[in-house]
Amino acid sequence: MARPSSPLITREAIAEAAIGLIDRAGDFSMPKLAGALGVRQSSLYNHVNGREGVIELVRTRCIEDLVVPNYRELPWREALRALIQAYWRSLAAHPNLVPLLIRQTVSSEVVIDYYARIIEVLLRAGLGEERAVHMLSVIDDFVLGAALDVGSPEVAWSINAERYPRFARALQLMPNREARASDAFGFGLDLILDGLARHLPAPSERTH
Amino acid sequence: MARPSSPLITREAIAEAAIGLIDRAGDFSMPKLAGALGVRQSSLYNHVNGREGVIELVRTRCIEDLVVPNYRELPWREALRALIQAYWRSLAAHPNLVPLLIRQTVSSEVVIDYYARIIEVLLRAGLGEERAVHMLSVIDDFVLGAALDVGSPEVAWSINAERYPRFARALQLMPNREARASDAFGFGLDLILDGLARHLPAPSERTH
DNA sequence: ACCTGAACACCGTTCAAGT
DNA sequence: ACCTGAACACCGTTCAAGT
């Protein structure tokens, strides 16, 4: 076959196929990715910088949807909530992807942009610069952990009900993993926002 | 050689060697693990249930140090803080390990034990059973995320200082990644505890 | 420029053979 | 019970050859 008159694959097609594999199978490999695109393994290297390149492609593709239009007009608490929720949603939509993302440095402009917006809101809320960066880390940590939780294997907490009666009973109450992860995220977000509100020196802003 | 009169390797030795490889190189493989133990690859399968088995071994080994002796006598807030800090410390001591741990279900008895203790303290603090399980998830999410942060690659936040002047300046203030991750963990822990205290219905417990 | 086939070094797992 | 060597199926990457 050699070189076709028009390329058989594109970077977009690669990203899409990779996400498909990851969503369905939890991971991807170069042979499988090539197979899904109807092409030979080595062809991929004409479009993408190896396996890591594929992952970077997938990252930007997934974070592109991270748009929060009106956060500037909202009071800090609502703005922060909206930003954080948007971040979590874009990750939680592809939970299997998170374990792949965390092993590589973030270089995407979109993500830097997002972080800058968070910092902006935190400073507006009255946080000092150092505290703002700490808070950014806390948010990042929590969102990443919560997104991981969505995709973590259905917990075979084979709890010994006799040794841990209350723990076993509490677990009984929970619905499936995904719903629990989602509820926990909402709860944790409220806690963090409450904690932050309490931490702020003086209520320099009040809305209703 | 065949079977030696006394085994050449033990599960303990395997765990130790694996941790060594992970700490030094960020990962391990069965051949390298065998090499470090002076033994052939296939010998490992006499002691351990494949690669996943090694990871489980390493997990329990790392969490064994997770001992918080006197949490029962402490007021709920201090007990919770001590338990969470101990968990984080045991993970943060081997940051490269965390990405390997998160991909497998927890089956270790030690971890279940730890979770049960957290639940116990949360119920004692006055949280409902459902909320307690949510809170357990929040704690798990945050600790995992924060532990990941410790080992994540030194952030090449090549921030455009003209586009994001305040973000760039705030980042300037930060020390190295490890110190930032640690400070952020402490700050986030306080926020979560504050938020939880605020969330509790009635102060059923007060100590000084 | 872009696809191919062959080649290389690496990986996880199994299993009969040996004591 | 426990180590070995050989075998298998899989992986990521490179590169000369072809158009």
Image (cartoon, coloured by chain):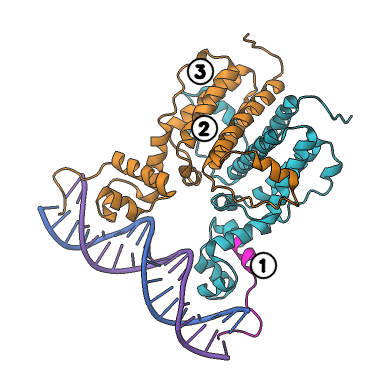
Chain colours: A orange, B cyan, C purple, D blue
Local crowd size for mark 1, using a 10 Å CA cut-off: few (<14), some (14–19), many (≥20): few
Q: Measure the C-alpha gap from mark 2 to mark 1.
A: 39 Å
In the orientation shown, which residue stands out farthest toward the top?
A208
* Front in this rendered view, residue A83 or A24: A24
Which residue does the image show at 59% across and 42% down from the upper left?
Answer: B149
Tell me the residue that label 3 is attached to: A71
In the image, which residues are magenta? B1-19
Residue B119 visible at all: yes
**Tag 2: amino acid:** Trp
Q: Measure the C-alpha gap from mark 3 to mark 1.
A: 53 Å
Helix, strand or loop at label 2? It is helix
Q: Chain of mark 3?
A: A
**Tag 3: amino acid:** Tyr
**Tag 1: amino acid:** Glu
Left or right: A6, with A188 as reference point:
left
* Front in this rendered view, residue A141 or B114: B114
Which one is earlier in the sequence, the residue at label 3 or at label 2? Answer: 3
Residue C4 image-quadrant placement = bottom left
Residue B134: horizontal and vertical position, in percent? 65, 36
Tell me the residue that label 1 is attached to: B12
Quadrant of the frame with the C terminus of chain A: top right
Is B174 covered by the magenta stretch?
no
Asked if labels 1 and 3 touch by Cβ distance under 8 angstroms, the answer is no
Residue B166 visible at all: no
Is B4 covered by the magenta stretch?
yes
Tell me the residue that label 2 is attached to: A88
In the orientation shown, which residue stands out farthest toward the right?
B208
Q: Chain of mark 2?
A: A
Helix, strand or loop at label 1? It is helix
Residue A189: horizontal and vertical position, in percent? 61, 28
